[in-house]
Amino acid sequence: MKIETLAIHAGRAPDPATGALREPIHLSTTFERAADGSYPHGYSYTRAGNPNRASLETAVAALEGGVAAIAYASGSAATLAAFSLATPGGRIVSSADAYHGSLRQLRELLPRWGVSVELVDTTDLDAVRAALGSPASLLWVETPSNPLLKVSDIAALAELAHAGGALLACDNTFATPVLQRPLELGADLVMHSSTKYLGGHSDVLGGVLVLREADPLPRLQEFQACGGGVPSPFDCWLVLRSLATLPLRVRAQAVNANAVATFLATHPQVEQVHYPGLAAHPGHMLASRQMLGGYGAVVSFTVAGGAVQALDVVAHTSVFTRATSLGGLESLIEHRASMEGPESTTPPNLIRLSVGLEHVDDLTADLDHALRR
Ligand SMILES: *Cc1c(COP(=O)(O)O)cnc(C)c1O
């Protein structure tokens, strides 16, 4: 079935007890055992398994074309679960341009467990081949990446990873399964911060991993149930509810983002625009091949000057709200370097936009006003 149909039907069925079309939110932490000690409905304790979580996992696995999905309390918890697949004393190779929290786990948490980390430009296949010359458990790629919107070749990276005995994991948060299907391109694992487009309304935190093959499933489920970083039943219910509109939201946001990026590209106060939909973007051709009819709805750009000038623009929008995060209905604007903190390598004059569903004329007028003051 097509993604529009799966988004509405996967993981959903009328409640067998009442016929309610929408699944009840199962807040119970514990489930009754039968007299023989068994669990007749398959649930024992909500950290180990919950019906709302199971429904969400079924739906996300279907959207990404995976065999299974495992939901966590945040994208960061899902990322850490994926990193836990590294063998002790092993190595992880990762995109150098990636979500700053993922890089922080790689730089600070993993080395304490004896896992070494190498950051490479994953748009440079020779650099990746060289990095995979020493054994690695995992190649982690974020594409399009945060905050520079770099585009990496998932199929080529999958080949390199597999030739080197590593799994390829792809952070698909920016593209969503509507615009990019990494498992079909050979990736072994997909990660989402469902806080972003899957949730889509800036009101729920979550993360999920999706698997192409069942091999790593027991380890990842153990990290979920035993590690305990599980999403609440209500959070799972909210994300599942939002998935129904994911294809509509993401495509419309990508159309708006393309128009905003095109507008910024010729603006006299703008130095450079990073958006793979622009023909001048170095990843444009690859993104056109690899992505499914849209380039996502995150746009970043640099303004003439430094942090002061960028902060001044950010201070003067009124439709774009000054806030971090992305993927919600409303447009957000952010001075990225000051959000990422002192170790940030993001250019000080860079502004990141999450383009929402407002009318595009209001969005471009708002940016024009803030840029021209
Ligand atoms: C937000 C984000 C994450 C982290 O997700 P949380 O839900 O905030 O923990 C990881 N990767 C990308 C690309 C993100 O945008």
Image (cartoon, helix red, strand yellow):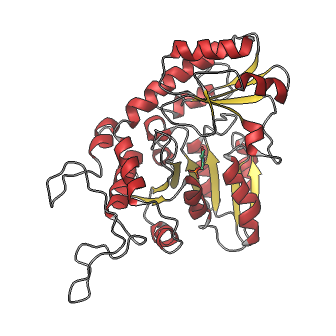
Q: Which image quarter: residue 69?
A: bottom left
346 with respect to 249 (left or right): right
Relative height, residue 130 to residue 314 (above, below): below
Viewer-nearest residue: 196 or 247: 196
Viewer-nearest residue: 188 or 311: 311
Relative height, residue 197 to residue 59 (above, below): above
Q: Which residue does the image show at 21% across and 84% down from the upper left?
A: 34
The quadrant of the rendering that contains the N terminus is top left
Q: Which image quarter: residue 265?
A: top right
Q: Where is residue 90 in the image (x, y as percent from the top left)?
A: 70, 69
Number of marks in the image?
Answer: 0
Viewer-nearest residue: 195 or 217: 195
Q: Position of residue 261 (x, y in %)?
A: 62, 19
The quadrant of the rendering that contains the C terminus is top right
Q: Is residue 102 visible?
A: yes
Q: Which residue does the image show at 55% across and 44% down from the upper left?
A: 155
126 with respect to 260 (left or right): right
Relative height, residue 352 to residue 112 (above, below): above
Q: Where is residue 338 in the image (x, y as percent from the top left)?
A: 77, 39
Q: Where is residue 301 in the image (x, y as percent from the top left)?
A: 71, 25
Q: Is residue 187 visible?
A: no
162 with respect to 225 (left or right): right
Q: Residue furthest bottom?
A: 36
Q: Which residue does the image show at 66% across and 39% down from the upper left?
A: 146
